[in-house]
Image (cartoon, rainbow, N blue to C red):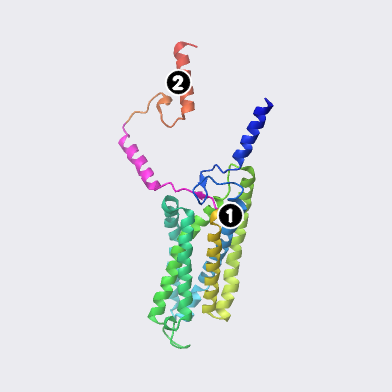
């Protein structure tokens, strides 16, 4: 008896070493709990979230000032362009989240979005530092160059596209690093969301204060260069965490499943609902078996 108890304890202890929440490691194996996930992986996610929020608010906070003072747009046109861009950054996560969950997976979507983000910020930096792409030929001008406008707005919408991949994927990917069925990791997951909010607000504060200060009192080119370097470094750091992450497999296009349900509902709309609940496929097998036993007892008068 004692041997059986000891064996069960050993089996339970061995089972605790592995994560059984349908996630896999970077080699597509069942993740080892001690070397993957939890805070050792979530810290990488928080770092890139800080960088992304600082870049986003560092650009959006002073954007209307850039359009009016540097590109010499009137206030109405500048406001319209800012609203278009903000609308794009708001709508793109709907597409990014769908593609991430159905096809690419969250990790690959984050990597793709971070590279597009880096491309956008790099273009902003180049538009200020490369002479042929600068807004004007000299310090004083009434109208910006056409090539600068093209590069500038291309950079902005690259950032909008990248934001569509970041917002729905990054926080979910961070939450994937914690096993809900494990008591200690479930507690750490609650703490992760608190730190997530702190990191998001910290990045926003740095973006609207320090970055904005450099834009106003140093130069736009230096501010964009700082954001570019920061984003490049955090992308490298995030990729270094690849062996520590837990990954969730994609489940395919959910719209197809919805369409199949709607098609089946339309085709079977005239069928009569059976009086016997045991004939309904929605009932679990265990409950279905119990209903059959109860029915048999009623028939035989037991």
Q: Which residue is mark 1?
A: 41
Q: Residue at x 46, y 52 (%)?
A: 105
Query: Seen in the image, is 239 located left or right of residue 151?
Result: right
Estimate how packed mark 2 is, as few (under 14), some (14 to 19) or many (20 or more) residues with alpha carbons within 10 Å: some
Q: Is residue 263 magenta?
A: yes
Note whether 70 is above or below 58 in the view shown.
below
Find residue 93 and report its horizontal and vertical position in percent: 45, 58
Does 300 appear in magenta?
no
Residue 261 shows up from this direction: yes
The secondary structure type at the circle numbered 2 is helix
Residue in the foreground of this view, choosing between 14 and 193? 14
Q: Secondary structure at mark 1?
A: helix
Residue at the right extreme? 2
Percent position of residue 168, x then y? 49, 56
Depth check, mark 1 against mark 2: the one in front is 1
Query: Disc 2 designates what residue?
Result: 292
State which tag comes first along the sequence, 1 or 2.
1
Q: Position of residue 215 (x, y in %)?
A: 55, 77
Query: In the current view of this chain or complex, which residue is farthest to the front?
Result: 3
| Rendered location of residue 16, percent (x, y) | 61, 41
Q: Residue at x 43, y 25 (%)?
A: 278
Q: Is residue 86 visible?
A: no
What segment carries the magenta color? 245-270
The one of 301 and 96 positioned closer to us in this rendering: 96
- Residue drawn at x 62%, y 53% is 39
Callout 1 touching callout 2 (CB < 8 Å): no
In terms of depth relative to the viewer, which is nearer, 302 or 17? 17
Badge 1: residue crowd in 10 Å (few <14, some 14–19, many ≥20):
many
């Amino acid at each position: 008896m004692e041997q059986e108890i000891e064996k069960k304890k050993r089996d339970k202890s061995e089972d605790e070493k592995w994560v059984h929440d349908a996630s896999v490691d970077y080699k597509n194996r069942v993740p080892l709990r001690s070397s993957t996930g939890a805070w050792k992986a979530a810290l990488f996610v928080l770092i890139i979230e800080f960088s992304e929020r600082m870049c986003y608010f560092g650009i959006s906070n002073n954007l209307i000032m850039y359009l009016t003072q540097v590109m010499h747009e009137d206030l109405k046109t500048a406001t319209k362009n800012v609203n278009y861009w903000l609308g794009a950054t708001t709508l793109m996560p709907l597409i990014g989240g769908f593609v991430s969950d159905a096809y690419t997976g969250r990790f690959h979507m984050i990597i793709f979005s971070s590279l597009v983000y880096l491309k956008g910020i790099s273009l902003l930096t180049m538009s200020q530092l490369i002479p042929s792409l600068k807004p004007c030929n000299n310090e004083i001008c009434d109208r910006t160059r056409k090539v600068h406008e093209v590069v500038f707005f291309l950079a902005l919408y690259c950032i909008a596209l990248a934001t569509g991949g970041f917002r729905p994927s990054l926080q979910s990917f961070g939450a994937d690093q914690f096993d809900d069925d494990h008591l200690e990791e479930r507690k750490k997951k609650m703490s992760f969301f608190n730190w997530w909010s702190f990191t998001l607000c910290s990045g926003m504060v740095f973006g609207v204060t320090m970055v904005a200060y450099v834009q106003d009192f140093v130069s736009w080119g230096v501010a964009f260069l700082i954001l570019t370097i920061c984003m490049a470094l955090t992308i490298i750091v995030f990729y270094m965490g690849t062996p520590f992450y837990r990954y969730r497999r994609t489940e395919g296009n959910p719209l197809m499943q919805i369409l199949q349900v709607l098609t089946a509902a339309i085709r079977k709309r005239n069928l009569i609902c059976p009086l016997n609940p045991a004939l309904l496929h929605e009932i679990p097998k265990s409950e279905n078996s119990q209903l059959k036993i109860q029915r048999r007892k009623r028939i035989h008068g037991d």
